Amino acid sequence: MTARSAARPRKSPTPPSRAPDETRSGSERFRAPWFNDRWCWGAVGTVVLLVWHSVGAPLGEPVAEDFDFLSRALLSGQHTLLDGGGSAAFWRPVSHQLYYLAFGRLMLWEPRLMAAVHALLMAVAVWLVYRALRPALSGPVSAVAASFPVLAESSRTVLSWPSQFVDLGLWLFTAWALYETTRGRLWRAMGALALALGCKELAVVAAALLPWVPGSAARGMRERLKWAIGLGAVALVWAGVYVWVRHRAGLELPHHLEHSGALAKVGLLARYQWAWWNSVRATMSLPLVTTSYVGWVWMGLSVLGALAAVVLAFKRAWRWKGARWQWVGWGLAWFALSSATLVVIYPLWQPNRSGYGSVGMGVAAAALLELAHPVFLAALLAVRIGAFAAAPGPGSTVAKLAPETGAFLDFAHLVRLQRLMEGTRLSLARAYPTLPHHAIVGEHRAPLRAEYSYGGSLALQCWYRDTTLRWVRYEEFESDPSMTPVTMVEYQPDRVPIVALVPPIALRLADEASASILRHDWTATRRTLDSLDAIPIDPGAALLRSMIESRHALLWIGLGRPVDAERAARSATALWPESPNGRYWVAFALIQQDRLVEAVAELDSLLVSAPDDTSALGMRRAVLSQLPRSH
């Protein structure tokens, strides 16, 4: 080597093309405090969007199984953690016992404050996931991934329903465990995992995957095995106690899913496909039924995926980012395992159950799209926000029929039940601030597939903190003439107020009038209706007042007074437009007045809402057969 060549500076090989962040350690890449991190605030701020899209619903209103847990926590005097805590299916001591002991009185006193607590805990969960991901991933990727469970239509259920602390607590404590894992704090991660398992069984996914978090503080195979043993030990202890409690308390899955011969014939692969595909749809805020915006969402996602794939195929730099691909694989494994755990509840789909797996989907999707180009990350966020915003807002009334969304329970179903509960609770509280011991309250015409939301008598007992109170169905009241309820809660379909309180004697007299009408005893009918007219009835009790007017119409028809009958029947229809009886007797009175064309029009209107009404169909045919002779 010559002196000249020795003095010449030697050129080092050109390193592979890398993004600046990939050449630095996690601590060098991320030093800014979280409160100065705009991406952190952006992720947490998505909770505001969730609350905004839920405003108008009776947020936090206890419903259905909430009353099982509230009754056990507040009224039974039993506080052991070694049973279902009010559940006949699951042992979840954190979400079923400790949660209702801590917040039960608050959710009964002011339910919306309970929703505010849920919103705050959601924000904490997002913050924990963001902080866990941020040392290894960029701000945009961490923000999109951390907020993935929030920007889903189904998360409105988690925000609004106290019972869904099972999913919120699972998400919150898993986020804490993930945060501690990325900081290398094993004992804290084990404690957080134990709390997550105490909320819901799906936390076994975290026990299996947290030791293998890419880029975590637990580096090296020996260290990761130590974490796997520690977290696995927590899961094994929990599983042992879980099996013991289930056997001791006689717990089993709802609807006898464990012993269903019909479900046993459905293959495991078919169940997994059901769970996986429904989870994908729910994560993208898409219902199981087709809606006007579903096609646009799929089109947007398809175009986004195709363009990103093309860019990745021709981009050289992505091949050097092995650490990023580890995050993609880990996230996909999280989503796949979380979806697999849902096969046991086939076919009872609730979209909020997809939220846990969506954490992994968010990590995988965000990490992969940024590899192609950050613009794809922004496009994914735009599509998800659009699908989330397109989901229908909360309904303002309680429909007679449950919405057909394809789900066993979702936000639309929940709002319907919560409005019924809120309307009943507030109406009773205004009219009866207190109730005597052993008082009876009855219901009249509860909407279909909604009566279970009262939990039998538990809702009434929790509202008044009195286990002696009794809630009875109308059929029970009708069959027992000696029963004397304090009041009857009458459901008002598709209108506000949702319920009205009616005197039990008014329903008794209405039934007596019907019986005398069937006997054609018009004297007794008139006497009964006169007594009924003398009873003060809430003007908002449209259903009962419509029933009374219909009976008046029948009385006038029986007495040969079709003009009076028409007036009464039209009054019944005005009070309750959906009533088939009102329009039927309007048509009948019109026929008696030889106004056949008008009668056909009334019957046509009736058959629009009740196409299978055989009496109306028969009357229409008879009238049509007379029309040629009448003109």
Image (cartoon, grey):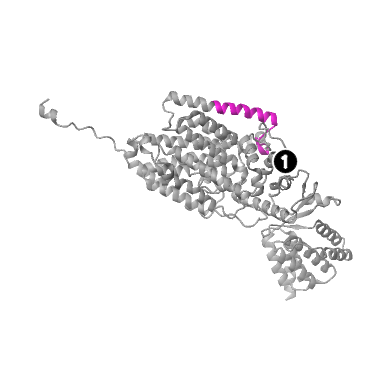
Number of disc labels:
1
On the picture, is 121 further left or further right than 430?
left
On the picture, is 121 further left or further right than 588?
left
Q: Is residue 579 magenta?
A: no
Location of residue 493 by image quarter: bottom right
What main secondary structure does the magenta stretch of the protein show? helix
User: Which percent across, then down, holds residue 251?
Assistant: 68, 33
User: Which percent across, then down, holds residue 387?
Assistant: 50, 51
Foreground: 432 or 367?
432
Answer whether residue 450 is visible to the viewer in this image. yes
On the picture, is 212 further left or further right than 401?
left
Answer whether residue 265 is visible to the viewer in this image. no
Q: Which residue is at the far top?
A: 222
Q: Which residue is at the far bottom?
A: 631
Question: Where's the C terminus, which quadrant?
Answer: bottom right
Q: Is residue 244 magenta?
A: yes
User: Which percent across, then down, holds residue 235?
Assistant: 56, 28
User: Which percent across, then down, holds residue 369?
Assistant: 40, 43
Location of residue 85 by image quarter: top right
Foreground: 19 or 259?
19
SS assignment at label 1: helix
Foreground: 8 or 409?
8
Residues in magenta, as a range: 233-257
Q: Looking at the image, which residue is at 45% across and 34% down?
A: 330
Q: Name the residue under label 1.
A: 75
User: Is 180 placed above or below 118 here?
Assistant: above
User: Is 302 placed above or below 88 here?
Assistant: below
Question: Where's the N terminus, which quadrant?
Answer: top left
Q: What residue type is labelled 1?
A: Leu
Please tell me how crowded label 1 is: few (under 14), some (14-19), or many (20+) other residues with Cα within 10 Å. Answer: some
